[in-house]
Amino acid sequence: MRILYIAYPLLAATPQSCGGAEQVLCAVEAEMASRGHQTALAAADGSACAGELVATGAPASRLEQLDERQQEQRAAILLATRERRFDLIHDHSGSFWQHAAGIDLPVLATLHLPPNLYSSDAFLDPAPNVFFNCVSESQAQAFRALPGFAGVVPNGIDVAQFPCSAQKEDFVLWLGRICEEKGPHLAIAAARLANVPLVLAGQVYPFRYHQEFAEREVMPQVDGQAMRFITQPSHREKLDLLRQARALLVPSLVDETSSLVALEAMACGTPVIAFRRGALPQIVQHGKTGFVVDSVEEMAAAIPLARGISAAECRAHVSAHHALAAMVDGYERLYAQLLERARAKREAA
C-alpha cells in the first residue's frame, strides 16, 4: 500500500514527541514502512519518519498560528496527492478530514481526543470518503454514530523498548505536557499529602496558556528536592524515570481516550495511580497494575500501596493488550477494508 500520514500541523512529529498522537503516528508509520508499505508523512519541518517527509512549514510558536499552519498543511497535501500516487490517507492531525472532500482517496481519521475537545462543527456532514476510528472502547461510546465510523484500534507500544525492573526508588513520577488538563499541580498535592518525593518531567509547549499555567501553578512548587522538575527529558532519562519510579501518577482532568505514558510505565514494571477519567479505568487494572482513584486524597493514600503491585504483572498486561504489533495489525486491516470499499465503489460507478 501507498499511505500518506498527516500530523498535527503546529509541532514537529518525532518518536520522542511529548504528545501521544504524534508518538502513535510515528510508531504506526515506521512499522508500516518496515512491513514493506510505501509511506509518507505530511508534517512540520524537523519531523522524522521512515518514509518520505512532506514538509508543511515551520513549527509554530503560538497556538494563534493554527489557522495559518492548517492552510499551509492543506496546500502541501493537495500538491503531494497530485504529484504522487497514494492509495489512502491516514489523518492524525485532528482536523484535516474536514477538508478532504476534494481528494479522491479514502481518508481514515484517527480520533485521539474526547468529543468535547473538538470544535462544535468538526463532524458536521463529513465527506463520503472520510472514515473514523477511535483508540479505545471508552472513547468509541461517543463516536459510534458518526457516518463512516470504522472501528476501534487500541493504542500500543513497542514493549521491548521499555526495560522492566522490580527494584524501585523512593519517588513518584508525573510525566507529560505541562498543562492544566494533565494535572501536574494535582500530582504535586498528592505527593505532598503522601510525604513522598515527586519528579515532574515533561515539556511546556510554546502556547501562552500552557506557559502561564506552568509559571503560576507548577514552577513555584519546585524546590529541587521534594519536588524536582526535568524539562524535556531525553529518551534515556525518560526510560530511567519510568523504570525507577515507585509509581506513575496520572491525575488527568479530561476524559483520556488512552494513555501512552501509563502503558510505558507498566511496561517498565511501574504501577500507575490514575483518576477515573475516560479510558484510564480500562488501561489500569485496579489492584493488579495500579489503582484507579477519584480524588487527590485517594491518590495520596494509594501511593504506599504501590509497593504491593507486581512489576511482572504490569508488563504482562501491556504485552497482552497493548503491543505495537497488535495496533499496527489493526490499522492494516482497516486500510484493507477501506481500499476494498473504494474499489467496490469504483466498479459500481
Image: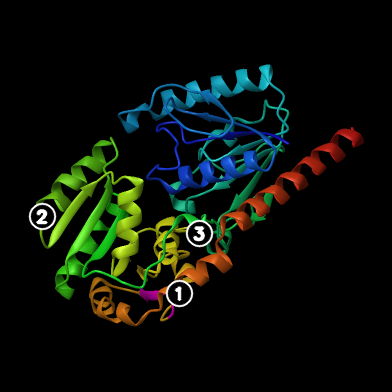
Magenta region, main secondary structure: strand
Chain-order first, disc 2 or disc 3? 3
Asked whether residue 64 is drawn in magenta, I would say no
Amino acid type at circle 1 is Ala
Query: Mark on residue 312?
Result: 1
Identify the secondary structure beneath mark 1. helix
Residue at 50% in and 40% down = 94
Residue at 22% in and 67% down = 171
Residue at 31% in and 72% down = 167
Identify the secondary structure beneath mark 3. helix
- In x, y percent, where is residue 310? 41, 78
Position of 50 with respect to 309 (left or right) is right
- In x, y percent, where is residue 238? 33, 52
- In x, y percent, where is residue 80? 62, 21
Mark-to-mark CA distance, 2 and 1:
32 Å
**Residue at the disc numbered 3:** 159
Position of 224 with respect to 17 (left or right) is left
Q: Residues within 10 Å of mark 2 (few under 14, many from 20)?
A: few
In the image, residue 132 above or below residue 309: above
Amino acid type at circle 2 is Gly
Chain-order first, disc 3 or disc 1? 3
Task: Give the extent of the magenta segment.
Answer: 288-292
